[in-house]
Amino acid sequence: MISDILKEKLQKSLGKLGLSADKVIFEHPGDFSHGDYSTNIALILSKKEKNSPKELAEKIVENLEKPKEVEKIDVAGAGFINFHLTKEFFASSLKDATKESFGKNKTLAGKKVILEYTDPNPFKIFHIGHLMTNTIGESLSRIAEFGGADVRRVNYQGDVGLHIAKAIWSILKDKKKVETNEDLGEAYSKGSKSFEEDEKAKEEIIEINKKIYSREDEEINRVYDQGKEISLDNFEKMYEKLGTEFDKLFFESEAGKEGREIVESNANLFQKSDGAIVFKGENYGLHTRVFINSVGLPTYEAKELGLAKIKDEYFSYDESYVISGNEVNAYFDVLLEVMKHVYEKEGFANKTTHIGHGMLRLSEGKMSSRTGDVISADSLLGEIQDKVLEVMEEREVENREEVAEMVAISALKYSILKQGIGRDIIFNFDKSISFEGDSGPYLQYTTVRAKSVLDIAKAKGLKPSNELPDDWESIEIERMLYKFPEVILRAWQDKSPQLISKFLIDLAGSFNGFYATQKIVEEGGEYKIFLTKAVANTLKNGLHLLGIKIPEKM
RNA sequence: GCUCCUGUAGUUCAAUGGAUAGAAUGCAUCCUUGCGGAGGAUGUGAUGUAGGUUCGAUUCCUACCAGGAGCACCA
């Protein structure tokens, strides 16, 4: 790595001056005029020395042996030492950027990583919140794969619990045939409403809930089994659309059993309180949470406790990630504390990380799944797709619907992944989904365009070559491409797909600028064609990491 | 009330303690020759308030103001 070479030379120079530094940090300046690598070492060391940072920087540079990859070294600003790389370095680094494997690394080689995400509940609507969790989880899974990890994607679905009792109560009461997912959604929101407003309904629902667990009532079992099947089929279709293939589905019914046993066999850790079994988190700076409720049923907490073990039996993981909305952050802290004690030997708590993402909220107000006031993923995607079709109207494209769906999903996924994971997304139907500028479709469009250029070059018999033309001056694109692998490393380290989004949008912008000012396909343009190939390949790999598909034409 | 998160152009988002706080969108002006205009170029415009730490603060600390989430049998 070039940065290692720079570090070594710099240490030597410091040595000559009788100085030393434990760690020398190189970074890429935001502004290209400040070079390709930069270090603030002089600013830090000048504190101990009496020299001014700028003078010290100049002394360091005087004693610095310039590696062949470096064009020039200069001192700027308050005392930064900036390194400008040579065009030969860029030209040779481009070779990597045209490789299929560009961006892959080995930081997670041999590691078993399990990621749980999406977690919709049968009998309920797959809403836009699930869309958000899925998008983030899928992207992180792919980034882990690029790091060489053995990855398992898992999904944990609530197939028991009050929400189902509510839906079943409504179905039984109306004696209605349930055939579609919409029927289920309707039944749920109706049952949910009655649960809040009608005491008698509430009692009946609680009664049904017990029978769902015990499976003693044939009528209930029949409705339950049928509804679950309809729901899961519907989810499968959605996963396919979104580009996620789960390796394993877990269900609350199994996790509940396991969890209850674990709570019972660790009785000393828990306390009885008002008929429930609780964990007093106050002793650990946390709060109290119920694990087994007063009716004797395991809550989500106990289920998740069981799930950690079930996951390990399935795939003895080194790292486990649970991706969900950040509304459960506090509860997850409690859970991890309990896991520390319960699974002391197994060390699950240390291997498990909860990633809480922000909420998708509507500018018009809050979304509530209890009142049935939710926006389904289907309706949102449909609406975006209609807008895409409008833009596509005048274009000649085969498979219109299919392409429009790809573009719609890309628009949505990008708008989720372009910002920090923990932050809420304020959603405005008219404005939020963009097809231009800082958007998924822009990235797709740029990739398709670059590929189209390559096709034309090929048809004209012009072959890409990374041999530099005599009068070549290195351009922004070259100075960006070689950073892609570093970006991916950091994206995993920080669990921030947004770093990849940012990188791709900058790269695409830079390429579009290049495209607008230069003719690429021409005699003597072999290097520019090579550059285009590198950009297309990098965009392709980057978009893959965001979970975005690329159409042939759009 | 307690805990956590967030306050950056009109709007939606960036900025591992660094250099002139970046994009996009909006608005204004411009780009037929040359390969996809879902594009390109130029201009416009912002760190909630008050202190502190630091050579250097959007970033760290304190207080305040504003918004959001969580705080016992939902998940």
Image (cartoon, rainbow, N blue to C red):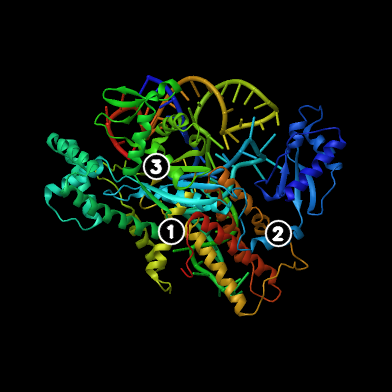
- Same chain for the residues under marks 3 and 2 in the image: yes
Give amino acid for label 3: Met
Q: Quadrant of residue A194?
A: top left
Circle 1 residue: A243
Q: Position of residue A366 (x, y in %)?
A: 32, 41
| Viewer-side residue, A553 vs A126 | A126
> Is A407 rendered above or below residue B69?
below
Chain of the residue displaying label 3: A
Circle 3 residue: A359
Circle on res. A227: none
Give amino acid for label 1: Gly
Circle on res. A93: 2
Which element is circle 3 on? loop
Give amino acid for label 2: Ser
Count of all numbered marks drawn on residues in the image:
3
| Viewer-side residue, A526 vs A139 | A139
Q: Please name which of the two marks, 1 or 3, marks the residue nearer to the observer.
A: 1
> Is A410 rendered above or below residue A33?
below
Question: In the image, A57: left or right of A26?
Answer: right
Q: Position of residue A289 (x, y in %)?
A: 35, 28
Chain of the residue displaying label 1: A
Q: Earlier in the sequence, mark 1 or mark 2?
A: 2
